[in-house]
Amino acid sequence: MTSLSSGGIIKFDLKAWDEKLHRQVVSNRQTFKILNYIYEGYFDKRSEPPLLVASTLLIQGM
């Protein structure tokens, strides 16, 4: 994996943590499937910098 060997990271921009809210934007099923694949297969290979970073968009009032 290029990010692992180069010292880079993989960043996911999650539109919402809650699936119901996320579905209003887009389905998160595939996103979580990919996140899980990276976490289970590669996450423990390097701690600094972290290989995987996920962020969640905060929407005021939702």
Image (tube, rainbow, N blue to C red):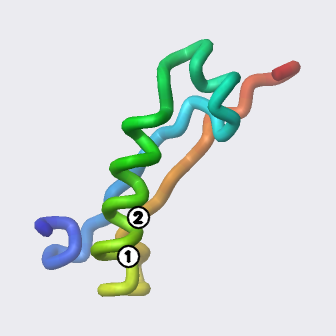
Q: Position of residue 46 (x, y in %)?
A: 34, 85
Q: Residue at the location (29% across, 73% down)?
A: 41
Amino acid at the residue labelled 1: Phe
Give the residue number, with chain letter if any, for mark 1. Answer: 43
Task: Check disc 2: other Cα within 10 Å, few if <14, some if 14-19, many if 20+.
Answer: some
Helix, strand or loop at mark 2: strand
| Residue 25 horizontal side relative to residue 47, left or right | right
Q: Position of residue 14 (x, y in %)?
A: 53, 38
Say how many tags the image has. Answer: 2
- Which disc, if any, is residue 52? 2
Q: Is residue 49 above or below residue 28?
A: below
Q: Quadrant of residue 35?
A: bottom left
Quadrant of the image for the N terminus?
bottom left
1 or 2: tag closer to the N-terminus: 1
- Looking at the image, do the residues carrying marks 1 and 2 touch, with CB atoms under 8 Å apart? yes
Q: Residue at the location (24% across, 76% down)?
A: 7
